Image (cartoon, grey):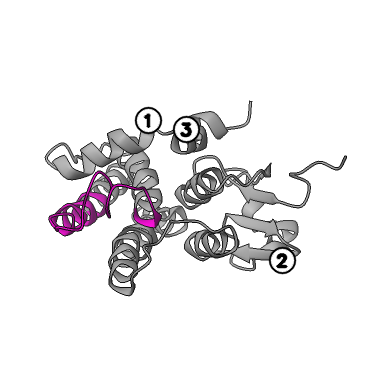
């Protein structure tokens, strides 16, 4: 019998929050896969080999169903549509709200805290590590404060939308991992913290955690 993971390959980096999102989505939808690490610190993401997978030089990249996918939220939505998932609500208003929550992180916080941008800031600042830390803390906290306020909504339940984790939750949890890495304070955000506690207790989230995914 052939290996059931042979046709599903995730090219990722263990600390990448975008990769973390996709690992959660794959786990939630029960998709078995093989992980092929792409080391960002070693520059493998900008190697010729990886640039043929994704000309942007980003991770993750997912090979599945005979196609190659990039961009974590696009991958998650593809998986949701093709694996009969429930990462998005059935109603249009609910889907719009969940996507908006996910985009707060993926399109507002993540881009300005991406290593390729922050490393450039570090370079032009003369290698000021304190400035980099301040930058990360400022933008992560600012975005999470907005996210916390958006959760003050009747549609919020045990998770970001209702009582089932979905696209917003799989985007939030990796961002909190980054917040912890940079000591960005979200101790005054009770809704976010409660959702994180519930999500991280679920096997699909726990198995995707960077500490469980880093190469030996």
Question: Which residues, given as a range, are shown in magenta?
Answer: 139-168
Q: Secondary structure at mark 3?
A: helix
Q: Quadrant of residue 103?
A: bottom left
Where 13 sits versus 210, above or below? Answer: below
Q: Residue at x 60, y 63 (%)?
A: 82
If you read the primary sequence from the N terminus, does the residue marked by circle 1 or circle 2 appear first? 2
Residue 6 place in picture, x, y as percent: 78, 47
- CA separation in Å, label 3 and label 1: 7 Å
Name the image quarter holding the N terminus.
Answer: top right
Name the image quarter holding the C terminus.
Answer: top right
On the question of residue 40 being in view, the answer is: yes
10 Å crowding of disc 2: few (<14), some (14-19), many (20+): few
Q: Residue at x 44, y 56 (%)?
A: 86
Residue 165 among those drawn in magenta: yes
Where 163 sits versus 63, above or below? Answer: above
Q: Which mark is residue 203?
A: 3
If you read the primary sequence from the N terminus, does the residue marked by circle 2 or circle 3 appear first? 2
Q: Secondary structure at mark 1?
A: loop
Please identify, in this view, whether the residue under mark 1 or under mark 2 is nearer the observer: 1
- CA separation in Å, label 2 and label 3: 28 Å
Q: Which residue ends up furthest to the bottom in the rendered image?
A: 92
Residue 135 place in picture, x, y as percent: 27, 51
Q: Which residue is mark 1?
A: 201
For the residue pair 116 and 181, the one nearer the viewer reads as 181
Q: Which mark is residue 67?
A: 2
Residue 179 place in picture, x, y as percent: 30, 42
Residue 28 place in picture, x, y as percent: 50, 45
Q: Tell me whether circle 2 and circle 3 mark residues in contact (CB < 8 Å).
A: no
For the residue pair 173 and 182, the one nearer the viewer reads as 173
- 141 left or right of 32? left
Q: Quadrant of residue 197?
A: top left
Q: Secondary structure at mark 2?
A: strand
């Amino acid at each position: 019998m052939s290996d059931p993971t042979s046709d599903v390959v995730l090219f990722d980096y263990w600390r990448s929050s975008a990769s973390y999102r996709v690992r959660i989505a794959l786990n939630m939808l029960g998709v078995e896969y093989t992980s092929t690490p792409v080391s960002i610190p070693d520059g493998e993401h900008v190697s010729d080999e990886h640039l043929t997978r994704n000309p942007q030089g980003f991770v993750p990249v997912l090979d599945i169903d005979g196609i190659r996918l990039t961009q974590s939220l696009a991958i998650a939505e593809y998986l949701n549509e093709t694996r009969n998932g429930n990462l998005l609500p059935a109603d249009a208003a609910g889907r719009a709200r969940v996507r908006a929550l996910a985009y707060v992180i993926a399109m507002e916080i993540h881009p300005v805290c991406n290593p390729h941008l922050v490393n450039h800031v570090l370079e032009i600042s003369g290698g000021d590590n304190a400035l980099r830390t301040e930058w990360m803390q400022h933008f992560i906290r600012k975005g999470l404060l907005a996210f916390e306020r958006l959760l003050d909504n009747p549609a919020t339940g045990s998770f970001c939308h209702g009582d089932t984790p979905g696209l917003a939750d799989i985007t939030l949890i990796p961002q909190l991992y980054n917040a912890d890495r940079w000591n960005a304070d979200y101790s005054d955000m009770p809704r976010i913290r409660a959702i994180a506690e519930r999500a991280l207790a679920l096997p699909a989230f726990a198995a995707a955690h960077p500490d469980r995914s880093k190469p030996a």
